Image (cartoon, rainbow, N blue to C red):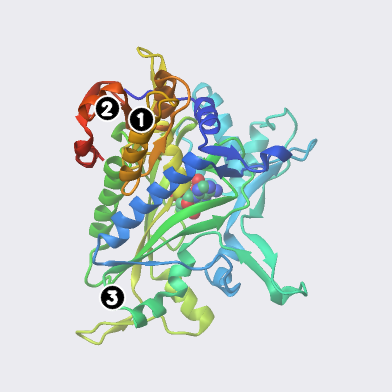
Amino acid sequence: MPTQPTLEQIVSLAKRRGFVYPTSDIYGGLANSYDYGPMGTELLRNIRDLWWKYFITARPDMVGLQSQILQHPRTWIASGHVDAFNDPLVEDLVNHKRYRADHIIEEWLEKKAEKLGLEMLIVEDMDIKEMAAFIVKHKIISPDGNKLSEPKEFSLLFETQIGSVAGDKSTVYMRGETAQGIFTNFKNVLDSTRVQLPFGIGNLGTSFRNEVTTGQFVFRTLEFEQAEIEYFFDPEKEDWQDLMTTWKEQMWAFATQELGVSEENLRWRQHTDKERSFYSLDTWDLDYKYPFGHKELWGIAYRTDYDLKQHQKFSGKSMEYTDPHTNKKFIPHVIEPAGGVSRFFLMTLCDAYWEDKENNRTVLKLQPSLAPYKAAIFPLAKNKPELVAQAKEIFEELSQKYHVAWDERSSIGKRYLYQDEIGTPYCITVDYDTLEDGTVTIRDRDTTDQTRVKIEELAQYLEQRI
Ligand code: ATP
């Protein structure tokens, strides 16, 4: 059974085996920024592709979109991000390090709440004034033991300039979410495709947020990939609660069946009335039990017609949909399932991590569809040309269809251990018997069982299992 790893174990495996490196490592790193190495890039790509297939191409009611990171700045004024996309920050008054006030209170509560009988307190329900009062009342100090400033709102949006002259007109924002690109293109999609309500648009790509909380690895980064959907519908024809239930079921199924995550590590959490954004009528978080506790993996919100109305108001362009049967004109409502690819990524690493004590090895029990390599091909010895030639032939055939690894270095045992740690489900060895009877050894990552299979049946063997 996979074991719940510590964050240190995950970070160490990720670096050791080429999943994740600190960004600008040679310069000492950059806070909350990570690069994906050869294995991480493949895992990320597999997750992204699975998401795209599951939610976009496999459905008749969905289409995809790729909008820009830099958009017209009015987009972010209309969406409310310029005014209200803030985190409450406190500053250590001695060393000037900044922290999220809600995170500082949460950590304090984790340590003290039970003793003081405060366990029912929900930090998400506190506004900035309540946080300020709470910090003063309980004399909460910084992690370095210093006094904290009053919490202040801090914008998460990164600003930049376009053009050669910096000035108000050229200030643009790096998008803080992919969703707004969907709303601003709503009319374009309506006018250029055959969609009819209810339908959804998915947008997958990089977003930026000026996050200050450190220590959560790829869970919370400045630059990250989002996979967001806006599902548009007529509120007079569809029951939003039914839609919400169906979407929640699909998100759960994607996490458990496609990404193969254990159900017991997932939970739904509904936002309280105070926590929920004012335009949303219902919001839920799908939380995963990361090594640092249950945290949001994916959110789903019923946002009514708020966003399209805002863009209609700020752009002066109609965002109405005309019902083809009744000619009724109206602004559709939306349900928004919004996820983060890097949070999916960290979840799959944590969930697949397994210390196999019996065999003294670390294994990533990734779903075969997610594994960076589906199989690894080994010639038993690299100095035997007949073995190498036969193994190369197998590599060339299988690599037409699958991403397969080639390894001829060190002992077979060491090669197995390496492939286990990067999650390769099958290792195929060409040995002297291969030259006699045309069979190879296939070794299974999870059971370590070995079987002999005929070369001509290899493709079929993998097809049945991947
Ligand atoms: P949190 O409360 O954890 O900061 P959020 O509620 O602000 O997240 P949303 O605005 O709902 O997040 O964004 C949708 C999804 O984007 C999240 O569910 C998460 O998976 C992902 N996401 C948001 N911020 C980050 C980040 N800084 N790094 C990585 N993924 C992120």
Q: Is residue 441 above or below residue 343?
A: above
Residue under circle 2?
435
Q: Is mark 3 within 8 Å of ligand 1?
A: no
Quarter occupied by residue 56 = bottom left
Specify the label residue 34 is tagged with: none
Callout 1 touching callout 2 (CB < 8 Å): yes
Q: Pick whichever of labels 1 and 2 is earlier in the sequence.
A: 1
**Does 319 sit left or right of 434 as displayed?**
right
* Residue neighbourhood size for the residue with mark 3, other residues' Cα within 10 Å, grouped as few (<14), some (14–19), many (≥20): some
Under mark 2, the amino acid is Leu
Residue type pointed to by label 1 = Glu
The kind of residue on which mark 3 rests is: Val
Mark 1 or mark 3, which has the lower sequence index?
Answer: 3
Q: Which residue in the protein does label 1 denote?
A: 386
Point out residue 424 in the picture as x, y percentages from the top left corner: 37, 33
Q: Nearer the viewer, residue 68 or 327?
A: 68
Does residue 302 appear to the left or right of 39 in the view shown? left
**Mark number displayed over residue 195:** 3
Up/down of 83 relative to 381, above or below: below
Q: Is 73 or 371 nearer to us in this picture? A: 371
Task: Give the x, y percent position of residue 174.
Answer: 60, 62
Lower sequence index among marks 3 and 2:
3
Percent coordinates x, y for residue 215 in the rendering: 59, 35
